[in-house]
Image: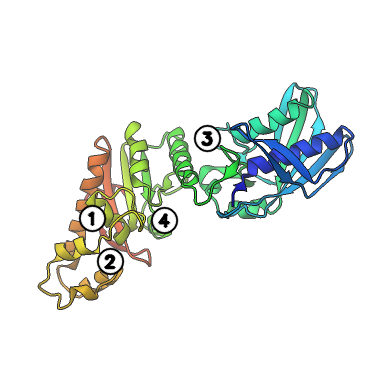
Amino acid sequence: MIGYTTGTCAAAASFLAAIRLMGQPHRDYIPVRLPDGNAVGIAALDSGLGDASAWATVCKHAGDDPDITDKAIIRADVSKSSIPGVTFFAGTGVGTVTRDGLQIPPGQAAINPVPRQMITNHLLALGECWNVTISVENGEHLAQHTFNPRLGIIGGISIIGTTGIVRPFSHESQLCAIRCEIAVARAAKLQRIILVPGHYGERSARKNYRQTEDPGIVEVGNDWGFALDLLNNEPVESILIVGHTGKLAKLAQNEWDTHSSRSSSALPWIIAAWGNDELMQPETFTTVEGFYRFTTGFSRCAAFWAAIAETIAAAIQGKVPCTRVAVSLCDMQSLIVAESTGVREWR
């Protein structure tokens, strides 16, 4: 089932609030025109009138791909303005942009361009001058589970959406988050950036290395090819990659999308690199983490994993030839397993 973005819900709430301000009664469904020109009906929760203003609420339904904002209550407060067009404000639970590099300049409500345009189109069909305040119930708490704090968006979530609908299991939002993080880091003129696949790497980076304040850490997930291509277009001086050995070792095999369904396990390659002399039953190892625990009983353990880190760094270096690359491998407790040369500059 298709869902609708926070931007579409905000447009529906804004339109309902505006027609209430103009004297029309509450409607249970609000027609909203999406960016592609198609029209959809969005269910409204409630609406009402205030002093020279009106408000309306909509419950977001994310469809078959629920995210952190699924079932969030989105409210629009609308009033007439003396300024032509639509002026946007961040209400409770909607963030404010504080850093350069995003589509919205610092100081503005974190309502992205497409939702702004959708709201503007619907309101200007009713009149020429409007003030719109978008709020999200519990939005400040929800934002702690998003990329917003890392991007310098404070006080709540962002009102987002490019198509107006949520496509099940869309990959687009993940790539958008990476693009935004790198854009904010560039806008901050950072020349040294840390890339991590997820929580293990981020915890290890923040514990063990310098220059880990946001926006200096970018969470890549599985999309290494996409992130490195972005950095290759506008090279920085140095990058440090910190992550779990099993995930990062895939990069040494030129697997630039490391999702388990789209890449092969790094374990056979690592076992082959170790050699079978000490392995009575190599097929008993099912994870890289388990194999690492096994190797800690051998004197060559440290040298072996350092060599793995060097091989990973060399593969990444081939993707970003104008940037210095260093690699730090960690385990599932975020403890450092091995480092490549070049890590020293990050300590």
| Three-letter amino acid code at the position of disc 3 | Leu
Mark 4 Cα shell of 10 Å, populated few (<14), some (14-19), many (≥20)? some
| Three-letter amino acid code at the position of disc 1 | Ala
For the residues labelled 4 and 1, the Cα–Cα distance comes to 18 Å
Residue 198: which numbered mark, if any?
4
Helix, strand or loop under label 3:
loop
Helix, strand or loop under label 1:
helix
For the residues labelled 1 and 2, the Cα–Cα distance comes to 14 Å
The residue lying at 52 percent from left, 43 percent from top is: 151
For the residues labelled 3 and 2, the Cα–Cα distance comes to 38 Å
Q: Residue furthest bottom?
A: 280
Residue 288: which numbered mark, if any?
2
Residue beneath disc 3 = 102
Position of residue 55 measured from the top left corner of the image (x, y, whole percent): 81, 42
Residue beneath disc 1 = 309
For the residues labelled 2 and 4, the Cα–Cα distance comes to 17 Å
Name the N-terminal-most of marks 4 and 1. 4
| Three-letter amino acid code at the position of disc 2 | Val
Helix, strand or loop under label 4:
loop
Name the N-terminal-most of marks 3 and 4. 3
Image depth: mark 4 or mark 1 in front: 4
